[in-house]
Image: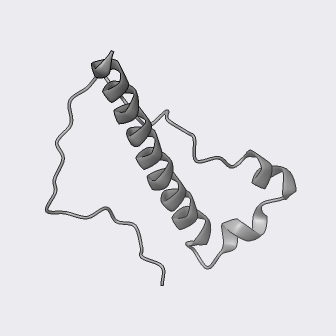
Amino acid sequence: MEDQAIAVLALHLLQNCLVLINTLMIQEVLLEQNKSLLQKLVREDFRNLTPLIYAHVNPYETFELNMKERLAIQRTS
């Protein structure tokens, strides 16, 4: 039972990390190119934006994690 609880908590942590990264990536795309994409969006487009996308994630493959390199996401101040 304890192992299952740890697995569930680990999956929640992974989901939260994925939502954070997706949110940052969506913001980056919307704000690049002098905000031209952001100006083209209509109300319905904003309703459909969600950071809960996961099609770009493949949980069944191995991947290399380079802890010496940061993601190319701009820091906002």
Question: On the picture, is 38 further left or further right than 77?
Answer: right
Q: Quadrant of residue 7?
A: top left
Image location of residue 72, percent across then percent down: 34, 65
Image location of residue 24, percent across then percent down: 49, 61
Q: Residue furthest front?
A: 2
Q: Residue furthest bottom?
A: 77
- Against 76, residue 46 (above or below) is above
Q: Tell me the residue at 34%/34% (across/down).
A: 10
Q: Nearer the viewer, residue 32 or 63?
A: 63
Image location of residue 49, percent across then percent down: 69, 49
Question: On the picture, is 13 further left or further right than 47?
Answer: left
- Against 20, residue 30 (above or below) is below
Counting labels gives 0
Q: Residue furthest top?
A: 1
Question: On the picture, is 2 further left or further right than 18?
Answer: left
Q: Tell me the residue at 13%/62% (across/down).
A: 68
Q: Quadrant of residue 43?
A: bottom right
Image location of residue 46, percent across then percent down: 76, 55
Q: Tell me the residue at 84%/59% (across/down).
A: 42
Q: Nearer the viewer, residue 10 or 66?
A: 10
- Against 64, residue 5 (above or below) is above
Q: Nearer the viewer, residue 2 or 76?
A: 2
Quarter of the picture holding the N terminus: top left
- Against 72, residue 65 (above or below) is above
Q: How is the image coloured?
A: one colour
Q: Tell me the residue at 57%/41% (across/down).
A: 52
